[in-house]
Image (spheres, rainbow, N blue to C red):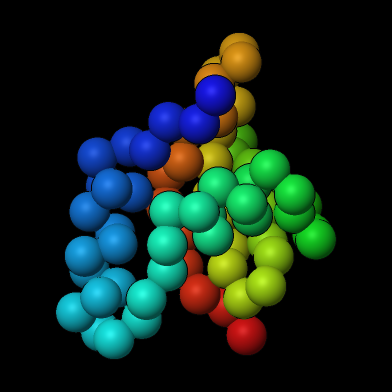
Amino acid sequence: MLYFTKYAENKFEILNKHKVFLTREQVENTVNLPDKIGKRGKLQTAQKEGVKVIYKKDGDVLKIITFFPVK
């Protein structure tokens, strides 16, 4: 199950103000089927098609902390 933190939910609006448009589906797809995975401290990262997601695995729940566009 995927859970978006309050900050992650607000991140869509923050990026939209800067004319960067990502959808919830893109973020979910990045976590579910990543091209590249890694770690950032205690958190995990997933990257796919110009989107990078920072998340934390908590049992069966994947908590989306933040996400952003990458080149």
| In the image, residue 17 above or below residue 58 | below
- Can you tell which quarter of the image residue 16 is in? bottom left
| In the image, residue 9 above or below residue 50 | above
- Can you tell which quarter of the image residue 53 is in? bottom right
Q: Is residue 68 left or right of residue 37?
A: left
Position of the N terminus, as image quadrant, is top right
**Residue at 54 percent of width and 41 percent of height:** 55
Q: Residue placed farthest to the right in the image? A: 35
Q: Residue placed farthest to the top in the image? A: 59
| In the image, residue 32 above or below residue 24 | above
User: Would you say residue 43 is visible in this rendering?
Assistant: yes
List x then y, in percent, for residue 64: 46, 41
User: Would you say residue 38 is visible in this rendering?
Assistant: no
List x then y, in percent, for residue 48: 69, 65
Q: Is residue 44 left or right of residue 8?
A: right
Position of the C terminus, as image quadrant, is bottom right
Q: Is residue 7 left or right of residue 67?
A: left
Front residue of 21/15: it is: 21
**Residue at 42 percent of width and 69 percent of height:** 22
List x then y, in percent, for residue 52: 58, 63
Q: How many marks?
A: 0
**Residue at 22 percent of width and 54 percent of height:** 10
